[in-house]
Image: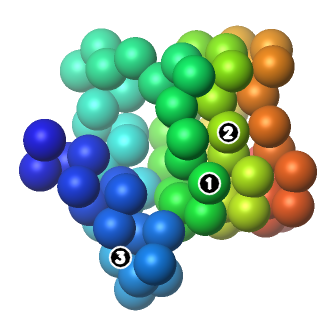
């Protein structure tokens, strides 16, 4: 729950970006499911989301600069207005 809180707090606290990136990376590799979640505005630059399933997830307006999405499943994922620079 603590890691999820950091991730969601980053929506309004850009200074938590690196902590949120680490949190989502840890949660992903621990097996947390991110399908159909509202992750609008999260700050997750540099996160490693290799192989993640983001089906139906809303990442609009998220900061995903330099996030790794190798072999990610992104069907029905909303990336509108997200910062996807160098992804």
- CB atoms of marks 1 and 2 within 8 Å: yes
- CB atoms of marks 3 and 1 within 8 Å: no
Q: Quadrant of the N terminus?
A: top left
User: How far apart are the two marked residues, 3 and 1, measured between alpha carbons?
Assistant: 15 Å
The residue drawn where x is 75% and y is 52% is 60
The residue drawn where x is 35% and y is 76% is 16
Looking at the rendered structure, the secondary structure element under dot 3 is helix
On screen, residue 14 above or below 33: below
* Color scheme of the displayed model: rainbow
Residue, disc 1: 40
Q: Residue furthest right?
A: 80
Residue, disc 2: 58
Q: Position of residue 47 (x, y in %)?
A: 50, 49
Pick whichever, 81 or 45, lies toward us: 81
Pick whichever, 41 or 64, lies toward us: 41
Lateral position of residue 67 relative to residue 2, left or right? right
On screen, residue 11 above or below 38: below
Residue 72 visible in this rendered orientation of the protein: no
Of label 3 and label 2, which has the lower sequence position? Answer: 3
Lateral position of residue 13 relative to residue 60, left or right? left
On screen, residue 31 above or below 82: above
The residue drawn where x is 41% and y is 82% is 13
Residue, disc 3: 16
Q: Residue furthest left?
A: 2
At label 1, counting other C-alpha atoms closer than 10 Å, the crowd grade (few under 14, some 14-19, many 20 or more) is: many
Of label 1 and label 2, which has the lower sequence position? Answer: 1
Residue 85 visible in this rendered orientation of the protein: yes
Lateral position of residue 77 relative to residue 67, left or right? right
């Amino acid at each position: 729950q603590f890691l999820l809180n950091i991730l969601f707090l980053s929506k309004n606290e850009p200074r938590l970006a690196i902590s949120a990136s680490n949190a989502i990376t840890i949660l992903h590799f621990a097996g947390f499911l991110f399908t159909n979640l509202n992750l609008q505005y999260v700050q997750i630059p540099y996160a490693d989301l290799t192989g993640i399933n983001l089906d139906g997830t809303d990442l609009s307006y998220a900061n995903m600069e330099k996030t790794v999405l190798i072999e990610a499943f992104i069907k029905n994922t909303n990336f509108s207005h997200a910062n996807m620079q160098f992804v």
